[in-house]
Image (cartoon, coloured by chain):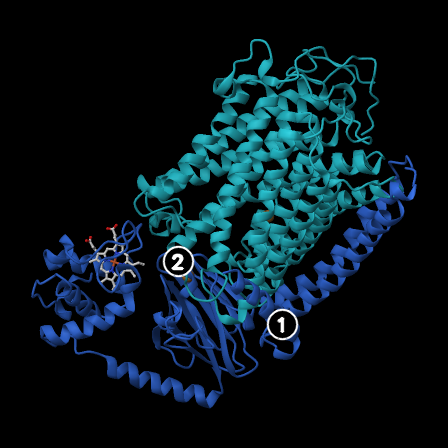
Chain colours: A blue, B cyan
Amino acid sequence: MIKKFGASIGSALLALHAGSAAAALQLNLTPGVTVGSHVAYDLHNLMMWIIVVIFVAVFAVMFWSVYAHRKSMGHKAANFHENTTVELLWTIVPIIILIFMAWPATKGLLMVRDTSNPDMTIKVTGYQWKWGYDYIKGEGEGISFLSQLSTPQDQIYGKEPKGEHYLLETDNHLVVPVGKKIRVLTTAADVIHSWFVPAFAVKQDAIPGFVRDTWFRAEKEGEYRGQCAELCGKDHGFMPIVVDVVSAEKYSAWVAEKKKEMAAAQDDPNKKWELAEMKARGEKVYAANCVACHQANGQGIKGSFPALDGSKMVTGPAEAHIDRVLNGKPGTAMAAFGKQLSDTDIAAAITYERNSWSNKTGNVVQPSDVKAARK
Amino acid sequence: MSAVIDNHAPAHGHDSHDHGDHHGAPHGLMRWVTTTNHKDIGTMYLWFSFIMFLVGGVMALTIRAELFEPGLQIVSPEFFNTMTTYHGLIMVFGAIMPAFVGFANWLIPLMIGAPDMAFPRMNNWSFWLLPPAGILLMSSFLLPGGAAGVGWTMYAPLTSQMGPGMDTTIFAVHLLGMSSIMGSINIITTILNMRAPGMTMMKMPMFVWTWLITAYLLIAVMPVLAGAVTMTLTDRHFGTSFFNAAGGGDPVLYQHIFWFFGHPEVYIIAIPAFGVVSQVIPAFSRKPLFGYASMVYATSSIAILSFIVWAHHMYTVGMPVAGQLYFMYATMLIAVPTGVKVFNWVATMWKGSLTFETPMLFALGFLFLFTLGGFTGLVLSLVPVDVQLQDTYYVVAHFHYVMVAGALFSAFAGVYFWFPKWTGKMYDEKLGKIHFWLTLVFFNMIFFVQHFLGLAGMPRRIPDYNPQFTEFNQISTIGAFGFGLSQLLFLYILLKAIKSGKPAEQKQWDGADTLEWTHLPTPMPYHTFENPPTVK
Ligand SMILES: [Cu+2]
Ligand SMILES: [Cu+2]
């Protein structure tokens, strides 16, 4: 243990030393690729200079005192304890300095908060623990998908080496065109989340039941990463954001591709499914949407998330089960999945739960059953 | 301070030097359970807070151990969340606040020449609410679903998803709040009514002033916190929807209420710390506190301003830009009175006759690092910058500079300063200095690097992170373990001094000039100032 710690101190110090060369250790805000991030970066630098100057000035006085006015140097204490002039001075001068800081901050803020005239609008929904993206205006309108962590569990638990983008990678990236003003509407389905991408200087809380907005216009193509910034429960640390900023042509191509994909994924709502194929599909839906809480073995987490294996609701009449998954249970972490998943996916997940582990109902819940239960 | 002391008034009290031997005072355990003596109660507050400090510290070390490297090694994410939550709650409500109430109990009657607090029985009750509150808080861990993993801020609606551990936590907060309010009533009444003849308000030691102001802050905001958690409780169990949009409520309302308590809370912790430092620095500069009157006004303006800046914790909730501008300007304004205080302390040292015993070292550590924390606060006050830094490690670094290097350092300064007076024994100066330097170095090791983590965008309250953040997290973790071990040295220093410390002098510090030093023998009798001294 001690050896390990020692080695880490060594490596940490080495890394610090090599910091400038390796660029691995970031010591300042990211300069970013949006107006907002430039404003923040410049303002922060300005502040640092002012602070360093004041700090050095004040503590130079203090340390001079510490050096020169020591008793051991034979210094005798003076007895002054008031001086209206200096007291006024060190009240008024800071006020002037503050005004000097407030001016660029105000200018920057007014610029950053102007969400008018966007080229595109995207709605971002926070779920425990993934993001939903709906393109609601502009090119790509109608595209809608969920995006969640794609880092394998084995990397998290140290059974596999960690990749470069460990915890900052998702299955589906948000894709936007470069140079376009993107308005982002944020909201949430369960608890408060916060959509945070440092390179855009965008951090906007996603609040259940309310819609808030922010925007960014990325100046450079590239992949930008961020994560949820508001504590949102168990997997708060595991809901990253990846944004691909691409050229206009590439964006159009992506839109066409995505639309095709979505059309292909449309299921026939009237299809009658067999148990085996429904269960196979359900396993995937369950792995993507339910394991975080109910766990792969269906045992849940004692005290927090109920076991589905052997649950009365899951082995009882299907109606109650469908209702619980469609509409959730308000005031608990069990969300209303009716808003996120298609009838077929919900039917699949339910069928899977009803026929897995020790549950052997033999029921196949059909998409039409779910549709009938939606109101 | 500028009070001139009448040295003819004889040192008062009973002949016995040992508290336990006082005639009529119960012996053994019952003495502590039934005591109404401000000294006993002060001692109990201080020990309670030290125990809580160790408990909260173990939680901090759990957090830091998990964050030593990327990946999940030691705890599950749910448990990690409970650690950040209870570390915060315990340190704020169990360690720092009771520590300063302990100082208040010990010192206010002595400094103003009063025989005891105004309501000694209520004083006993204020203290004895704390252990049940602490037990209730910790019992959350044993309930089904475990303790609540919601952060010390307990934001809705995440609180609605928690198990019964949330409810015990809410009740514990209620108890702690009651204790604080009773303590505050006691402090205010004592200061306003029980000053010795001649001890006018503007002659009171700065420490007394800071507690008077703090007590008003507590009475104003503890009920607000109680309201916030009670609304959480009814939302959880009684069908209300204060914070539930589906029922017509608003989750952000919780944040407004919480921070209306929360920002003054910052000053509830900081202002008594200012008070301690304002006694220590003049004593070791052998020169009166510079700008006494401006210090009183500055402290009062900080207290008043603290009520109108709360939403600077909420810049990213999506408030109108006019709201952001207002809260930004108001927040920046706090820098002015805070600056006045720092300048006053430096001016107190200027042309003094300085020595650097352990209390002075901690006071200077406070001055230096608290100022740094104040500056990062100024950085955070600017909305465009805060949007990048809110809920990142930069904020964690900022408030630990203010809370640990601020309040905790000041509490250490206070303990070393008054320990000889309280116990009649002198601590080991050399070990004290070692404690200071270890604490200083490890503190900065933990928290300085966290500024960089925040600037690079690492969110707070996450149990695992991308490898780009590894180096600084490792430095931070190593620092944390060093810091934790250094505090065991502090315990050793105290125990050693109690057991075998050399007898302390009446005026152990030649620059100290408040009544407890000038008028009372060391060690102090169990009852003091039964006849008030005369202050000229
Ligand atoms: Cu989240
Ligand atoms: Cu605040």
Q: Is residue B212 left or right of residue B453?
A: right
**Residue A338 position within the rendered picture, expressed as x and y whole percent measured from the top left:** 25, 64
Which element is circle 2 on? Answer: helix
Tell me the tag on residue A362: none
* Mark 2 lies on residue: B77
Q: Amino acid at mark 1?
A: Leu
Asked if the beta carbon under badge 1 is closer than 8 A to the nearest atom of ligand 1, the reply is no
What residue sits 48% from the left and 54% below the top?
B63
Can residue B305 be seen from the camera position used here? yes
Relative to A327, say whether B267 is above or below: above
- Most foreground residue, B168 or B472: B472
Question: In percent of the image, x 62 and y 21: which residue is there?
Answer: B189
CA gap, disc 1 to disc 2? 30 Å
Quadrant in the picture for residue B282: top right
User: Which class describes the residues within 10 Å of circle 1: few (<14), some (14-19), or many (20+)?
Assistant: few
Amino acid type, residue under disc 2 in the picture: Pro
Quadrant of the snapshot with the C terminus of chain B: top right
Quarter for ligand 1? bottom left
Residue in the foreground of this view, choosing between B6 and B292 = B6
Chain letter of disc 1 in the image:
A
Which residue is identified by label 1? A14
Do dots 1 and 2 share one subunit?
no
On the image, the x and y values in percent for residue B469 come to 54, 68
SS assignment at label 1: helix
